[in-house]
Amino acid sequence: KNKPTILLDDAKGAYLLTKYLIDTGHRQIAGVFKADDSQGAERHKGYVKALQEAGMSYQPELVVWFHTEDRKVKPAVMVQMMLEAELPIDALVCYNDQIAYGVIDLLQKHNVRVPEDVLVIGFDDSSISEYSPVKITSFVHPKVEMGRAAANKLIHMLRSSDPEQPLVLDMPLHEKESTRR
């Protein structure tokens, strides 16, 4: 409290990503979220809110939770189990681009085409999103804007005794191949 902060609204971001999928006609939207950080919980919250606002029911069997130490294996294994159970998934919201990359790789190994059969969205527009077998639609992490805002906050703190207010930055969506049909 009362500390200068610059934040991204993870709940709003996941809400907008999920709403984007809903608005493009998708109804069986799976989610892959990280369980051991606040970003994962907030992104899950946004995913749930978008489903609820669209009148869609939350389906726990379409949600994967993983921990940091499981990130290289568990998300893909759990999505594979969804495929084997023949759950009708038509889109996936992933915790970040690294997870989306692994999911796309798994889907392709099982002859599931991205985006023709299943859309996949990441979250941070990292360089991984460009190296993926299918370029990943993702929110752009505003690194440069965050740096500028941090510098401006520091300058303001040096010049003024006024308390700093938290700054929440927006993230633009960078649409790529993983959601284009």
Image: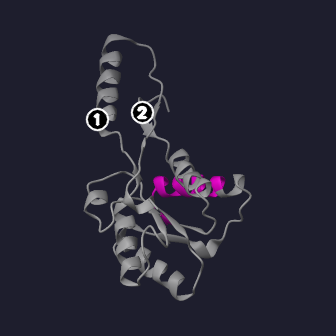
Query: Which structural element holds mark 2?
Result: loop
Q: Which mark is residue 5?
A: 2
Q: Count neighbours of disc 2 (C-alpha within 10 A) and say few if under 14, some if 14 to 19, many if 20 or more.
A: some
Q: Amino acid at mark 1?
A: Val
Q: Which mark is residue 68?
A: none
Q: Is residue 49 found inside the magenta-colored segment of the image?
A: yes
- Read off the magenta span: 32-50
Nearest the camera: 40 or 87?
A: 87
Q: To which residue does mark 1 refer?
A: 144
Query: Which structural element holds mark 1?
Result: helix
Question: Residue 161: x, y in percent?
Answer: 40, 13
Question: Residue 49: x, y in percent?
Answer: 65, 53
Judged left or right of residue 27, residue 98 is: left
Judged left or right of residue 159, residue 165 is: right
Question: Residue 113: x, y in percent?
Answer: 42, 75
- Residue 54 visible? The answer is yes
Q: Residue at x 41, y 62 (%)?
A: 178
The quarter of the picture where residue 5 lies is: top left
Q: Residue at x 68, y 66 (%)?
A: 58
Q: Is residue 133 found inside the magenta-colored segment of the image?
A: no
* Residue that protrudes farthest toward the right in the picture: 55
Q: Magenta span: helix, strand or loop, mainly?
A: helix
Along the polypeptide, which appears first: circle 1 or circle 2? 2
Question: Residue 149: x, y in percent?
Answer: 34, 27
Nearest the camera: 161 or 52?
A: 52
Q: Amino acid at mark 2?
A: Thr
